[in-house]
Image (tube, grey):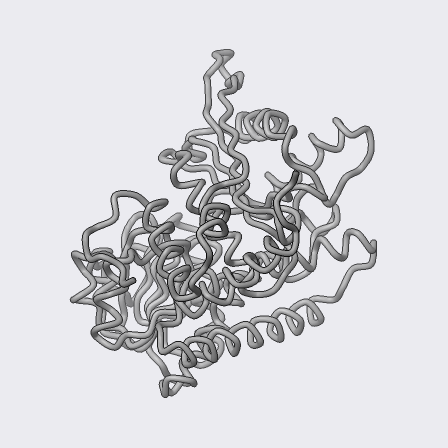
Amino acid sequence: MAISEAPATSFYQASLRQFDTAANLLRLPEELRLILRMPKRELTVNFPVRMDDGRVEMFTGYRVQHNMNCGPAKGGIRYAPDADIDEVRALAMLMTWKCAVVGIPYGGAKGGVRVDRRLLSKGELERLTRRYATEISLIIGPDLDIPAPDVNTDAQIMAWIMDTLSMHYGRNVPGIVTGKPIAIGGSQGRFEATGRGVSIVAREVAKHIGIKFEGATVVVQGFGNVGAITARLLHDMGCRVIALSDIYGAIANPNGIDVALAQKYVKEHGRLAGLPGSTVISNMQLLETPCDILVPAATEGQITFENAERIQAKLIVEGANGPTTPEADLILQRRGITVVPDILANAGGVTVSYFEWIQGRENFFWTERRVNEQLEEMMIESISRVLKKSDELNVPLRMGAYVVAISRVAEATEFRGIYP
């Protein structure tokens, strides 16, 4: 069944439509569809936080576990003023497929708190994090559900969560989160893992479709952890980065942007605008800039029915989760633009989170070189499987990735059966 061109009304509905399309390709039995479509568990928490001036404010947080038939749930926690249960449901489902497509023994989960982190002091941020961790402690644990950083969260926040839950357990529990500081059990290479994975995927798929990688022009939307690292690594691999954006706007330079200089400039000035040698452009202009490789690494719903006809990239590599709507996918497919889906393209982060989890359990930590080599090996194997499946079924890479992922979770579900 083809995806309808009628616009989806929500990110979650769009995720379900992509699942349904892959399920039809697989001819998945109805009972398996029912099980795999629905989240296993959802928790919404409303909790108080005392602010620096003595006031008490209420915040809302979420944790959704989509599926745990392949192993413990895994997924990040995001802090965003527009976070809601629908978004978290969609992201939890994507995490299930993301873990499955790279073959790691996790299910999918996601968490979020509705808050603008920029408005909090460090003390308020810590108190909010520790209270949220306590509220969701009922359903997370090193063998149950392991959170990680996501949008607007970082290693420090993971450290506070680990410390809070360790106090509850009465002992040190480093495996309760990944993405921790190295000093308390984090992994070498974790900070760069998602961006590194995106850059590996971009290189491999570019070669596969005949784009000369060295000298390829690149546009990156989003200059957070994923976007900035992806841009720098692609620059270091010989690509020419010609446009970048952050939450304040976008810049361009057709002759190429020195990404390391851009990172330094943002650290000093707080934004990309004003970078010497660059021109300010709009986010819309950035997405529509002619280029070889476009990396949307900001938020979901950026390439849509409205702008897909104007996208001028040869290859789109989804650094963010859900940046392309199903309606836009159809248009891009018709126009011959290759899209590497989020569940494959940005799976480097969860892959190295898995490495961190293993290292913590063994209490034996790897060198950064070993982490990066293992990541590259797993990403290349995963890309090869998806390319093969896509060619076999004559479908776009997104459906090839979904088929690989859903097949694995469906097989695990069938073997486990339904209890009682």
- Quadrant including the N terminus: bottom left
Q: Is residue 165 visible?
A: yes
Given residues 69 and 104, the one toward you in this image is 69
Picture coordinates of residue 290 (x, y %)?
Answer: 23, 74
The image quarter containing residue 169 is top right
Given residues 196 and 36, the one toward you in this image is 36
Residue drawn at 33 percent across, 46 percent down = 13
Query: Where 37 falls versus 295 (above or below)?
Result: above
Residue drawn at 48 percent across, 36 percent down = 112
The image quarter containing residue 12 is top left
Residue 265 is left or right of residue 10, and the answer is right
Query: Where 384 falls versus 22 (above or below)?
Result: below
Residue drawn at 39 percent across, 49 percent down = 269
Q: How many marks?
A: 0
The image quarter containing residue 276 is bottom left
Picture coordinates of residue 132 (x, y %)?
Answer: 57, 28
Residue drawn at 70 percent across, 52 percent down = 186
Picture coordinates of residue 323 (x, y %)?
Answer: 34, 56
- Quadrant including the C terminus: top right
Picture coordinates of residue 216 (x, y %)?
Answer: 36, 81
Residue 244 is left or right of residue 287, and the answer is right
Q: Is residue 192 visible?
A: no
